[in-house]
Image: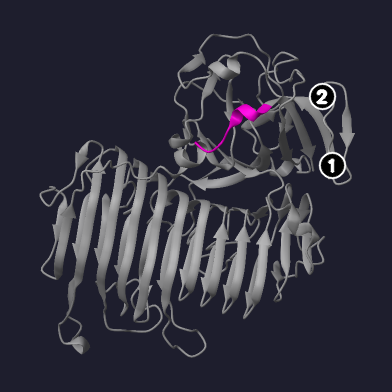
Amino acid sequence: MNIKKIILSIFVIILTSCNSNIVSSITTSSSSNINSSSYSPTENNYEKDDNGFYILEDDYFKNTAVEDDKKINKLVFSKNIDEEYIYPNMRLYALGENIPIVNVKTNISHSWTKEASSRVNNGAVSLEIEGKIEFIIQCNFRINSRLTINPTDAEIPYSIDENRRTVKFEISSKGQYTIEFINHKTLHLFVNSYHEYEEYKNKDNLIYFPSGIHNSSNSKYISNDNFIHLQSNQIVFIDVGAIVQAGFTGYQLNNVQIVGSGIIDNSMFERNVDTGKKLVPFDFSYCQNMKFKGITNLDPAGWCYNIYFCDNIEIDNIKIISSRSNGDGISIQSSKNVICTNSFVRTWDDSLVVKNYPRWDNGSEGSTYNVHFKKIIVWTDLAQCLEIGYETYGKRMEDISFEDIIIIHAYHNAPISIHNGNNAEIKNIKFKNILIEDASMGQGNGKNYLIDFSTEFSSTWSNGHGTTSLGSINSVEVNNIYLKKVNNSPTISIMGTIDTRPEYNNSTHYISNIDLIDIKIKDQVLNKNYSKYYKNDYTKNINFITTGQEINGTTFIKDYLSTIDKSIYGTNALVEIK
């Protein structure tokens, strides 16, 4: 697609694949002076529309075109979204356009119930940009200075106009952002790079979902069981503005890719714990050479990614918001050579979890190795953030890492956990460079733990797929962990066990060679005298180590943003509306 630069305040270009309007970005001085403490609490006389939003000045959301010789800013989004899917409490504007916000359920309870009844409406947007784009959020509820844009390391400047109930902020890079108001109201803004996945449109063996709603009633690709049953060597491209109401599944596949800036929405599918009714949107067994890139996943009716006995799996820039029972995010079971990067995972169960399961066909035990999570933003409303276990059927679980992770909220159980409930010999594990913005563990029926390692039998989890002996945990590095906001000092628990079940003859199962390096809770650097550190007699060589280096958790977002030169972009902008 060739786009020539013209005087942007005058011309409109019609593209073959979409409508494109050339407009300008905001040029008012307030854009360069925005800061997190700027807001206006004055009264107003604005009337409200039928949806409770103030009717503001005619030119409030308008952009003024100013031509220059710099690079053009670009924005891609879709308006092809039915009203029934729109989030009712916020509107999003950029470059003079109203960008639809998709409604998504989140769960504000931190105690598990099978009904998952404490779900509330929130908003999600997936779009693409290049350059710098100023956004305006308009709310139909009262706002004040209690606003957070996460991750805070992105240092997004913003201004609040309490009078108009608006927030202005500028985004200049791809990433996953949450704009969080009081009363559990959040906009999840997922920003992809401009045309990042466009090359896939020209691939062979393509399944293409353009902008719009796609389900079993209107798509030839979606079966009556609401699944897309994939074959080897297929590519699925889900474009900006596409909302696919289905799941993807495959068995013994090779070389499959699912990519794009679109949305998978499973909100219409039933999740019933009593009957086992569910729909896992990404359900793959015995597959190899698979890629998942860019997709936003809303309200899965069960686990979101079920990767079972697979090899050579790449997951990048995916986004997950779950709120129902067993709403695990990325679940890797009995798989090898898996890399998950640059993603956002908000869940009402374990966010990133690695397990060993047996084969369902013959009961043989699994093995898991070379599994790595890196540069991921996590928000865990229930259960664990970074978990190995509880189900660990099979001796081999090794070379697993969680590195450069930002946990923006941890509300329930330990952010860092290994629960060896079966016979695995878990070893060579790394939790490194982890920043916990909000360490609020212990809410609801959770435990206020930071680290929870155990080799104990669980009456809930250890017998689910057969009975095994217990295993061990060996060679774990926990390094550069920083808790920024903490309500109460969390526990570090490292507990091996003796197996008192009659058939296992009081066998001992140790946790050994654990290095706790540079762990900082607010201003306190931890050592072996930390008052909330507990271990038992079935542990060996547990070490607290302080290197003297800066303990900051991770700087991967700051490092990335330092490579971006915003000055090369001017005040002109191209808008593509799908």
The location of residue 430, given as percent across then percent down, is 33, 61
Magenta-tinted stretch:
562-569
In the image, is residue 10 above or below residue 274? Answer: above
Please identify the quarter of the rendering in which residue 62 is found: top right
Q: Quadrant of the C terminus?
A: top right
Question: Going by the image, does 465 lie left or right of 222?
Answer: left
Q: Residue at x 31, y 60 (%)?
A: 417
The location of residue 436, given as percent across then percent down, is 35, 44
The location of residue 497, given as percent across then percent down, is 18, 73
Q: Which residue is the site of mark 2? A: 8
Q: Residues within 10 Å of mark 1 (few under 14, many from 20)?
A: few
Does 49 lie within the magenta span? Answer: no
Amino acid type indicated by mark 2 = Leu
- The residue lying toward the viewer, choosing from 146 and 172, is 172
Instruction: Give the label, 2 or 1, closer to the camera.
Output: 1
Does 564 lie within the magenta span? Answer: yes
Question: Going by the image, does 9 lie left or right of 564?
Answer: right
Count of marks overlaid on the render = 2
